[in-house]
Image: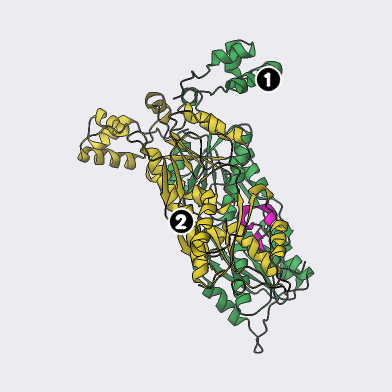
Chain colours: A green, B yellow
Amino acid sequence: MTSKKAPTMKDVAREAGVALGTVSKVLNGIPVSEKNKLKVEEAIRSLNYEVNTYARGLKMQKSNLIALIIPNTTNPFFAAFAYYIEAALYKKGLRLLLCCADGMPEKEIDYLNLAANNKVDGIIALTYSDIGSYIPEHLPIVVFDRFFENPSIPRIASDNFAGACLAIEKLLEFGCRHPVYIRFHSVFPGESDKRKEGYLYACEKYGIEPDYLDLVDSNYEPAVLKEFLKQHKNPDGTLNFDGVFAHTDYHGYMFKNILQEEGYRVPEDVQIIGFDGINLFGNREDGPVISSICQPIDRLAEQCVEILTSQKDSLPPSLTLLPVKYRYGGTTRE
Amino acid sequence: MTSKKAPTMKDVAREAGVALGTVSKVLNGIPVSEKNKLKVEEAIRSLNYEVNTYARGLKMQKSNLIALIIPNTTNPFFAAFAYYIEAALYKKGLRLLLCCADGMPEKEIDYLNLAANNKVDGIIALTYSDIGSYIPEHLPIVVFDRFFENPSIPRIASDNFAGACLAIEKLLEFGCRHPVYIRFHSVFPGESDKRKEGYLYACEKYGIEPDYLDLVDSNYEPAVLKEFLKQHKNPDGTLNFDGVFAHTDYHGYMFKNILQEEGYRVPEDVQIIGFDGINLFGNREDGPVISSICQPIDRLAEQCVEILTSQKDSLPPSLTLLPVKYRYGGTTRE
C-alpha cells in the first residue's frame, strides 16, 4: 500500500552487520550471541521491519495472536481485565484478538476452533457459557475464575475465600454487629463461589448468625433487594442489620442507593463492603465505587499471560490464587 | 493440536455436493448461485470447517482482521465503543485486534504498519496521539472524532455542534437562566471542539452572556473546578449560575460531587447536563451517570465498520455526523 518498499530480512542483516541466517534465527527465537541479538533487534527497530506473519504462520505455526474471550468490555471489571491483558501481551510481542461473547457460546466456540487450528496461539477465557466440552485437550488456554470439568485447564483467580473473611472482619472492626451477605451468582461453578464459603466460615469463627440473600445473577432486580430490606426492618423502622457484604461492587452500590432512597444513612446506619474494587470512569484517581475487597486485576491479567505463554516449557499449576485487599470507598466508617 | 483431523475444502465440497471450485469461490467471495452458496455455508457449519487463513493471507492478502486503536478500555465511553465495534465486525465475519495505546504513539504506529503491510485489513482509530504523518495514503482507515490533516481520511463523529445547542436549550427549558460551560479538551483538533462552537452559538441565539472554563484535558483536577465555583459565588453564598453544560459526563459528574460537597443541591440549585451518555457499570438498565447529551455509540461503531468495509467499492464521505439526543439522568428538573 505504501509507495516506499518495505524493508526485507536482507536489509535488516545489512543494517545489523550480521549474516542473514542470524536475522532468521533471532526472528524464529533460535539462540544467537547476546551481542548479535541486540544488533538485530536494533536494526529491526530502526528500519521498522515487519515480519511477514503469513509466511511465518505456515512455517512456524505461530500467529503471535492470543484470543481473549470475555462477556463484554462495558462491565468495568471486564473492561479493566481486557485492558491489562492487552498490556501484558504487548510486552511479550503478542497481539490481542478480542471476542465479546455475552450470551453467544457459539462465538466462544469459534475462537476455541481458531486455537485448535493454530490460527491463534492461545486463549484467555473469562466465560459464563457452557463450553467445557468444546475445549480440546492440550489447547493452550487459561481460564479466569471459572471451573471446568477438565482439571488440566489452568485457572487463575483471586483468593475469594480469604477476601470474604476479610470483608466480615473489616465490618466487625468498624463496629458492625450484624453483617448480612447479598449474593447474586452465576449458574456455572467458579472460584467466586468461595465468597459464600468464606462468609459462612467467618460467621462461625466470629459467632455471627448467617443471614444472606442467595440468588442466581439473572434474578437480580432492585425489587429483590427492596424485599430483603423490608424483611429486615424492626417494628420501629430501624434495621436488624448494620453491615452488608455484597458479592460484587455493583450489587453493593445498588443496595446503597436503595438504602439511601429509604432514608437510611450509609455508612452511619449501614456499612457496605463490596467485592471487585472497580473504579468509576476507570480512572484510578477518581476513586472507588464503594468500599471493597479489591481483586488485583492488573496482576491477574499478567498472571494469565505468564501462565499461557509458559505452557510449552512447564506444566502450569491447575489453580493460581492471588491475594486481595481492602480499600476504603466511602461506605464504611474507615 | 486436536487428534481429530481437521476437515479440508474437499470434505466441504463432498458434504455440500458441489464442485471443489464452487467451495473455493464461496470462500473467496466470488459469486456463485444462491443455492450453491447456501449449500456450501451449511457444509462449512456442519463440519466446523476452518479456512486456513495463513494460506489465504498469502494469496488474497486478506487477514479478516481489523485493528481498533483506542486509548484504553477502562474509560466507559471507549469501553462501549470497543464493544460495539467488535459486535459490528463479527456480523461481517471480521475479527478485532485490540490496541490500547494510552500515551504510547509508537504502539499506534506499530498497528498502522501492520495495516500498511496488509497484516490487517484496516484500522479504526480513536486516538489522541500525534500520528497524522504516519498514516500512509490509501490506507484503509476510519477515524472517530479526531481531525487529521489528510482530508481523504474518513471521519465519523456525533453532531457535537447540535448537541451543545440542545444542552443549552434543555437547560433553558428546565428553568435555567445562567448556564455556564466547563470544558476540558484534547490538544488535538477534533469534532468535539464543536461543542464549544455550539455553546457560543446558543448563547448568542438566546441572549446569554458566555461564561465558561476552557482548559486542556491534562490540566483537569478537582481544584480547578473548586476555584471556578469560588469565583461564581455571590456575597450571600448563592451562585451566580444555575446550570452547567459539561464537556463530558465525567467532568459533569465530578462537578456535581463538588457542588454537593459544598452544600449546593443538584438539580434544585444547579442543573447539570453532560455529554456522552455513559452508564454506570455499563448496564443500560442501571441508567445514566448524569443527565446528558448522548452519543449513539452503537451506531457510531456500526458506521465506522460500514465505511471501512465499503472503502474498496466507493469513496467514503470525508465526514459522517450522527445525531445525538438528550437523556434524563437525575441532574436536571426533567
Q: Is residue A51 above or below residue A164?
A: above
Judged left or right of residue A292, residue A226 is left
Give the residue number, with chain letter if any, for mark 1. Answer: A38
Residue A148 falls inside the magenta stretch: no
Residue B18 in picture, x, y percent from top left: 22, 33
Residue positioned 39% across, 33% down in the render: B6
Whether residue B135 appears in this view of the structure is yes
Front residue of A287/A312: it is A287
- Mark 1 residue crowding within 10 angstroms, few (<14) / some (14–19) / many (20+): some
Q: In the picture, which quadrant includes the N terminus of chain A?
A: top left
Badge 1 vs badge 2, beta-carbon distance below 8 Å = no
Task: Magenta stretch: give its range.
Answer: A274-288
Chain to which the residue tagged by mark 1 belongs: A
Residue type at numbered disc 1: Leu
Q: Is residue B8 above or below residue A273?
A: above
Task: Report the Cα–Cα distance between label 1 and label 2.
Answer: 54 Å
The disc label shown at residue A165, or none: none
